[in-house]
Image: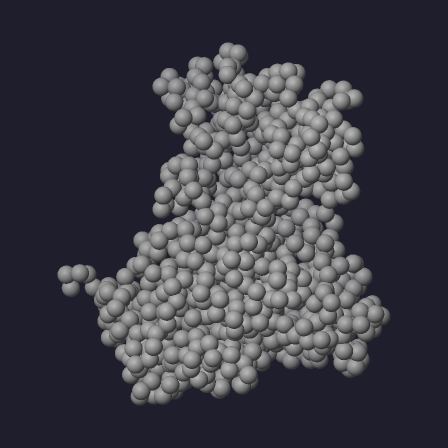
Amino acid sequence: MKDFIIPQFAPGDERDMGTPARHGPPVCLTIDGVQVTVPEGTSVMRAAMMAEVQIPKLCASDNLEAFGSCRLCVVEIEGRRGTPASCTTPVAEGMVVRTQTDKIRKLRRGVMELYVSDHPLDCLTCAANGDCELQDAAGQVGLRDVRYTPGANHFDVSGQGARSQAEARLRGGHDNPLFIPKDDSNPYFTYDPSKCIVCSRCVRACEEVQGTFALTIEGRGFDSRVAVAGENFLASDCVSCGACVQACPTATLQEKSVAELGTPTRSVITTCAYCGVGCSFKAEMNGDTLVRMVPWKNGKANRGHSCVKGRFAYGYAAHKDRILSPMIRDSIDEPWREVAWDEALAFAARRMHAIQERHGRRSVGVITSSRCTNEETYLVQKLTRAVFGNNNTDTCARVCHSPTGYGLGKTFGTSAGTQDFDSVEHTDVVLIIGANPTDGHPVFASRLKKRLRAGARLIVVDPRRTDIVRSAHVEADHHLPLRPGTNVAVVSAMAHVIVTEGLMDEAYIRDRCDWDEFQHYAEFIADPRHAPEAVEALTGVPAADLRAAARLFATGGNGAIYYGLGVTEHSQGSTTVMAIANLAMLTGNIGRPGVGVNPLRGQNNVQGACDMGSFPHELPGYRHVKLPDVRAIFEAAWGVEIDPEPGLRIPNMLDAAVEGTFKGLYCQGEDILQSDPDTHHVAAGLKAMECVIVHDLFLNETANYAHVFLPGSSFLEKDGTFTNAERRINRVRRVMAPRNGYEDWEVTQMLANALLRETGRAGWHYTHPSQIMDEIAATTPSFAGVSYERLEELGSVQWPCNEAAPQGTPLMHVDGFQAGRGHFMITEYVATDERTGPRFPLLLTTGRILSQYNVGAQTRRTENSIWHDQDVLEIHPHDAEVRGVNEGDWVRLASRAGETTLRAVLTDRVSPGVVYTTFHHPMTQANVVTTDFSDWATNCPEYKVTAVQVSPSNGPSDWQRDYQAQAERSRRVLSAAE
């Protein structure tokens, strides 16, 4: 007998172990003569796999609980009667298991014979050929013949005994009542019932992994089949996450891309370029053609799951709208002219240099992108500081999450979330405020819903009834539908209840926080004006509900707070973040698994864009540019003197442009004309500039006012890193050659060198983004231990990663706060200046939808538009009725800033007095109605509170028609003949 010690499997091990891992005391058993030691609760199947003993399976997968339906995994166990399924049988001390006996082999072959008797034998032409578990299992059990004569089956449409689909077509006829035609309704995958073996893996994946419960098994016995509630998959509750497709062991559920392009032959691990979850994917290829994106099992952020965007919406990278050649024009009224790279870069450099010569070095600036890599963002902010000689750098990360950096920096001493995503598995009470994870961060939402189904409690603070409030097998204990703009009042009222009822964790506060500051804060928050009853009329939240929610959060165990742009994009965004931090410290919910303050970042590299010094007052690592010792670090690395004066934010750039003092802009991967507030003002600022350089994949809305267009590369065409919402630094790996010829960091370097040549200075000489990361590590303490070598070794790391934490920091503030002690901040509620009145009696708030992303530049160029092809306005039926608005009507949405039109959707998701829309489609231009009000500390725009009026309309407004005409004129490109 051999003794087998269970090894620690490498991070890249992707074997399917059959059933989930368990944790417990060791148990020793013998499998096929090999002694195996595994944790208590482990299944016999998993124990066998860990001992390199293969047991055939069809219904089992290690991301699903054991089911025991396929009966292929039967084994014999000494001292036990029968042949139990190894997937559902837990190990026991001293157990002796045999997986290969004559009896077992005969049973497995008979089971497989039954499966194959009701399965079409067209394997050579099947899309899953070579990637079919049924095919593999048949070989594993030694099936060489099917003894059953053709009879009742689900695959022979002819009803004449055909054994394959091809034979059935030759025979003709449609006489088989059991045959169900293939469902092609979903744009990304097909459902072919004739190939279904009813293993239930897809149903269980939809329930256990995704949490949508869109699939079921209908019928009984031989009539059993997978079904959806609706006419077809497209009309059902299916969210197209792909979990069912990934789970399917046959071609029953199959990607259309595989059917079209063939089985992939190689793969590259990379990171999704959509939201801030940062899912890891295997990009599966045939040569240089991407066949499919499969969520990577060992991705620490997504744990093998995905959403419709990351899984399927990658087609934009090869869309016909993609611009692949540089273009220039002297005036925005002229058509574009395609030129070579050298000519475009020289044109841009001459213009920018001439502007600085005429108007001074602070007359130009840059905008970095939260969609680009850390390395690319670092170079763009370096360009303005080391080449332009100023600090005029800003980013969309400030436009969405700068209050997070400010508020958490003030309270905790760091400008990022405290937990990893795994932490949610230890949470007892979840408080979601101003976030819609099911639409904005769906993979994290699936993990959250799984925890909620396991018994965790839920509080949702949101003006709108989002899906997480009530969905399949999930319902919030408390939904507090506050009036937009009253976040501070609601959170302060919760804190008031906790303090006045003595529910705070005094021991934690004394040990970890500044006690004197707490006493001052407690005196402030205990004031009766913060009581739920005092703010009920202001917030619209019933006092009893608010008190109950506060008590639950304070007494319910591990409490975790997750928030989003519904917190930050307010005039008091920074104040709300500090109020949330106060709440976490009050209840002792910082510094261990299952708790924490967790900002859900909107884009794939919002965290990284902040980390890399994209703000005009901070160098990389959140260090103020005024500090001489900080500037000295970068001056030594870059060989230049850095301006100590903070630069301009985007609104300041636009104001200065209108005034005539800001004249040039390099905008990488950002579309400020569609994404930033007060569209009229943005357009006026861009129009006033003498040189606007847009660096992007497509001619976006901002490019309407550009003079230089530099084509960008997609995430599939570059190397680098993204940093997700949990501070996790993930590798982005080049999957294919850049279609434009260069990765984005190379384009920025070429532009910098063209500018440096104008002034006779030495250029940059990076040859790979790993060198840029080495420079980041050498200058930024929180990244000091980060290198591509370490990322390859560990898979990913969470900053801080340095000498004190060489493998990163999954949980922050475990032994103490970065600032030494936690700081309670006074959070006085101050009403926004944006008020309703007779002319504009409603409040507009904005957000996202699952199938679209940000300004839609990527997702609108995929099949995702089948679910959302236009922005719509959600309005309560009462508000619609008094305005004469019916479902689907065109309505005029007007504010003090501007107006647009869109179609109405009547719903009680929003309260009376509140309307809601998205901003994914440029024809709507929702930001034409948003105002220039912003957060008091960071200038983060107040997207979430706009006073509006809604009235019937006959269709698109004159402004929309004029805008569309101007955009079409601006996008003209001269042909080669011209």
Name the quarter where the N terminus is drawn: top right
Which residue extends farthest front? 2
Along the viewing direction, whichever of 805 and 466 lies nearer the viewer: 805
- The structure residue drawn at horizontal position 78% and vertical position 42%, both measured from the top left corner, is 25
Reply above or below: 210 against 262.
below
In this orientation, which residue lies closer to the viewer: 89 or 893?
Answer: 89
Where is residue 699? Give x, y as percent. 33, 63
Q: Seen in the image, is 791 located left or right of residue 366? A: right
Residue 791: give x, y in percent of width and height: 53, 57
Q: Quadrant of the C terminus?
A: bottom left
Where is residue 300? Give x, y as percent.
59, 52
Q: Is residue 43 above or below residue 681?
A: above
Is residue 598 something one can see in this rendering? no
Q: Quadrant of residue 727?
A: bottom right
Residue at the (48%, 86%) spot, across then down: 645
Q: Is residue 223 left or right of residue 708?
A: right
Q: Is residue 643 left or right of residue 329?
A: right
Query: Looking at the image, which residue sits at the far left?
Result: 977
Q: Residue at 76% of width from left, 34% of height from top?
A: 28
Residue at 59% x, 57% y: name it. 437
Please determine whether, in this image, residue 824 is positioned above or below residue 560: below
Indicate how the structure is coloured in the image.
one colour
Which residue is at the front of the view, 756 or 571?
A: 756
Total numbered labels: 0
* Residue 379 at least partly seen: yes
Q: Position of residue 943 (x, y in %)?
A: 53, 71
**Residue 814 location, quadrant:** bottom right
Q: Hey, which quadrant is residue 32 in on the image?
A: top right
Left or right for 90, reference 648: right
